[in-house]
Image (cartoon, rainbow, N blue to C red):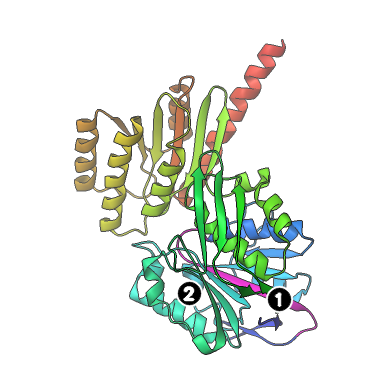
């Protein structure tokens, strides 16, 4: 197992590392889906085990404190020498600008690369491979072989300890007895022995796990997280208790049951995030579903067309009553796509409204909800503030009802 002593400096805009007095394990996570959930699960497990952990990514609010991606932040964080583990979510900005080429990772985790994402392009996958090859020394790579892009990832076999995961029987780690509802349950199956960073052999095993979160795709995130935790010497009972914890419910998609109806908040940047969101709510109790969504400005038209086709399919499966499009991203939904989408909704008997996403629009939608209805807020990161406003309005309404009941 490869560990690094880190000191950060900047040379011609590139992060460089040199020895310091503090030994730090650096874990990188790449892919267009699953990075944040994977990082947060690991954060929860590691910190519950007494380790000092930081997450570097482009989100400020997750389970606890998060760090914005910026060269100076990396510098201040790593030279402080206060942490045992640093988790870095490897995003498009990191790859495009070669910000991480100077870092020697102890471990790199591959989650999932979605169609239409930067990592799925020739340039994106080339940048991923450059990053893998630039990390000197023997390192561990956790590879998702159910992602079709895994064959494009170049592995230096001689200097890499490779562990694969997925639902296929050829993977090192797989899952069985999968159940998804208000939580995710599966049996973690280690099919052949692996070694942890202390060079201790972990023998094949089958252990049931419960993750207090929603959506079948968290089976994949869970497989990766459990494997990484075992490699870093975390006890199985600690992993089980950390994942079966209410704090995990704050990861990714969140479902709130308040005031007689449900609200589902899910950041949707690409096709897979929509698909996993719809899949997660299909077994939840509701009378009618209302969907608010918008499209990622960075998606090509072909991908947005697929997203709309997916929404039309799920509108039938879930019997969605009404759909609202928040036109907050410079009219990404062009007239041709919009006309085809509206025609499909009309044929399915689904009502549709185009809104600007103002607070007045939010109020109107919330006021239209009836008891046992479910509101899905499936918007990209650009509309995160509007999503937070929905929760704020709901909290105000609930507190108001409580106050009137007390009187």
Q: Quadrant of residue 57?
A: bottom right
User: 10 Å neighbourhood of mark 2: few (<14), some, or many (≥20)?
Assistant: many
At x 25% / y 57%, what residue is drawn?
302
Q: CA distance from mark 1 to mark 2?
A: 34 Å
Relative placement, left or right, of 163 versus 168 is right
Instruction: Using the image, determine if residue 172 lies above or below residue 388.
Output: below
Q: Are marks 1 and 2 in contact (CB under 8 Å)?
A: no
Residue 155: percent from the left, percent from the top?
47, 82
Please say whether residue 309 is visible from this viewpoint: yes
Residue 36 in sight in this render: no
Q: Position of residue 84 (x, y in %)?
A: 75, 70
Q: Which residues are magenta?
A: 20-34
Q: Position of residue 281 (x, y in %)?
A: 45, 38
Q: Quadrant of the N terminus?
A: bottom right
On the image, the x and y values in percent for residue 164 come to: 50, 70
Which residue in the structure is indicated by mark 1? 200
Question: Mark 1 vs mark 2: which is more N-terminal?
Answer: 2
Locate the C terminus and report the quarter of the image it occupies: top right
Q: Residue at x 72, y 68 (%)?
A: 233
Q: Few, some or many C-alpha atoms within 10 Å of disc 1 (few <14, some 14-19, many ≥20)?
A: few
Which of the two residues, 116 or 96, is positioned nearer the viewer here?
Answer: 116
Q: Say whether residue 162 is magenta.
A: no
| Residue drawn at the location 40% of the way across and 48% of the way down | 274
Res. 229 image quadrant: bottom right
Which residue is painted at 78% across and 79% down in the image?
A: 22
Left or right: where does residue 51 sit relative to residue 107? right
Q: Which mark is residue 95?
A: 2
């Amino acid at each position: 197992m490869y560990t690094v002593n880190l000191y950060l400096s900047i040379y011609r805009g590139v992060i460089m590392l040199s020895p310091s007095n503090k030994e730090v394990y650096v874990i990188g996570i790449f892919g267009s889906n699953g990075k944040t959930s994977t990082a947060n699960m690991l954060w929860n497990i590691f910190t519950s085990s007494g380790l000092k952990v930081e997450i570097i990514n482009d989100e400020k609010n997750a389970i606890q404190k998060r760090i914005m991606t910026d060269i100076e932040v990396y510098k201040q964080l790593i030279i402080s020498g206060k942490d045992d583990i640093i988790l870095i979510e490897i995003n498009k900005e990191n790859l495009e600008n070669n910000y991480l080429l100077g870092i020697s990772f102890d471990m790199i985790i591959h989650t999932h690369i979605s169609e239409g994402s930067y990592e799925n392009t020739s340039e994106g996958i080339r940048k991923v491979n450059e990053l893998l090859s630039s990390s000197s020394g023997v390192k561990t790579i956790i590879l998702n072989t159910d992602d079709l892009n895994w064959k494009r990832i170049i592995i230096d076999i001689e200097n890499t300890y490779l562990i694969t995961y997925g639902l296929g029987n050829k993977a090192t780690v797989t899952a069985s007895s999968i159940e998804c509802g208000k939580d995710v349950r599966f049996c973690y199956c280690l099919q052949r022995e692996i070694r942890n960073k202390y060079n201790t052999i972990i023998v094949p095993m089958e252990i049931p796990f419960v993750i207090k979160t929603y959506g079948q795709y968290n089976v994949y995130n869970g497989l990766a997280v459990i494997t990484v935790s075992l490699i870093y010497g975390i006890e199985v009972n600690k992993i089980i208790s950390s994942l079966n914890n209410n704090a995990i419910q704050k990861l990714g998609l969140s479902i709130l049951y308040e005031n007689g109806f449900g609200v589902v908040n899910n950041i949707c940047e690409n096709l897979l995030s929509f698909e996993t969101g719809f899949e997660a709510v299909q077994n939840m109790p509701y009378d009618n579903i209302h969907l608010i969504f918008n499209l990622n400005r960075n998606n090509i038209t072909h991908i947005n067309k697929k997203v709309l086709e997916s929404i039309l399919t799920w509108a039938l499966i879930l019997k969605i009553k009404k759909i609202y499009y928040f036109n907050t991203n410079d009219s990404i939904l062009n007239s041709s796509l919009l006309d085809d989408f509206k025609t499909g909704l009309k044929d399915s008997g689904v009502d549709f409204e185009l809104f600007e996403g103002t607070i007045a629009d939010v109020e109107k939608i919330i006021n239209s909800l009836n008891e046992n209805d479910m509101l899905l807020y499936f918007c990209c990161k650009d509309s995160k503030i509007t999503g937070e406003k929905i929760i704020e309005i709901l909290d105000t309404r609930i507190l108001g009802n409580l106050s009137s009941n007390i009187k």
